[in-house]
Amino acid sequence: MSAVYRLTLGLAREMEKSRIAEYTQLLHSPWRLIWLNIISGIARGVGIALGFTFFAATIIYVLQMLGALNLPIIGDYIADIVRIVQHQLELKTF
């Protein structure tokens, strides 16, 4: 009997660790589930936008530094890319 009790107690602890009760409550309240998904989607979108902006700015900065070195072939190519990006930034689309 004590072996069954220990097994049951172990299963109960594992279920508490997996937070299965909170998951089932979430499934029974669809509006809360929708709200949490909307908030998490917005957070992911903002994070992706900020991350890509930082990444693109870093790449443009590195390209500008490489363009300033006046490398023979690569310098012209990088200068063209920088000019195109700067031209796009100067355009007013609104």
Image (cartoon, helix red, strand yellow):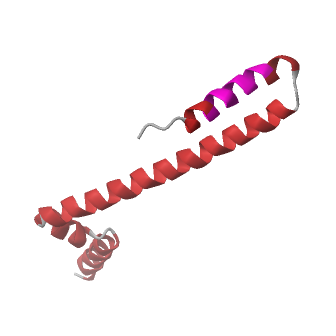
Q: Main secondary structure of the magenta part?
A: helix
Residue 19 horizontal/vertical position (percent): 29, 71
Magenta run includes residue 88: no
Residue 43 horizontal/vertical position (percent): 39, 58
Is 12 or 40 nearer to us in this picture?
40
In the drawing, does residue 28 fall left or right of residue 9?
Answer: left
Where 10 sits versus 88, above or below?
below
Residue 76 horizontal/vertical position (percent): 78, 20
Is 94 or 13 nearer to us in this picture?
94
In the drawing, does residue 33 fall left or right of residue 13?
Answer: left
Query: Which region shows up in magenta?
Result: 76-86
In this rendering, the count of numbered labels is: 0
* Residue in view at x 44 percent, y 37 percent: 93
Q: Quadrant of residue 71?
A: top right
Specify the quadrant that holds the N terminus.
Answer: bottom left
Residue 48 horizontal/vertical position (percent): 47, 48
In the drawing, does residue 51 fall left or right of residue 71?
Answer: left
Is 8 or 35 nearer to us in this picture?
35
Where 81 sits versus 90, above or below?
above
Specify the quadrant that holds the C terminus.
Answer: top left
In the displayed orientation, state which residue is furthest to the top: 73
Where 75 sits versus 40, above or below?
above
Q: Quadrant of residue 89?
A: top right
* Residue in view at x 88 percent, y 31 percent: 69
Magenta run includes residue 84: yes
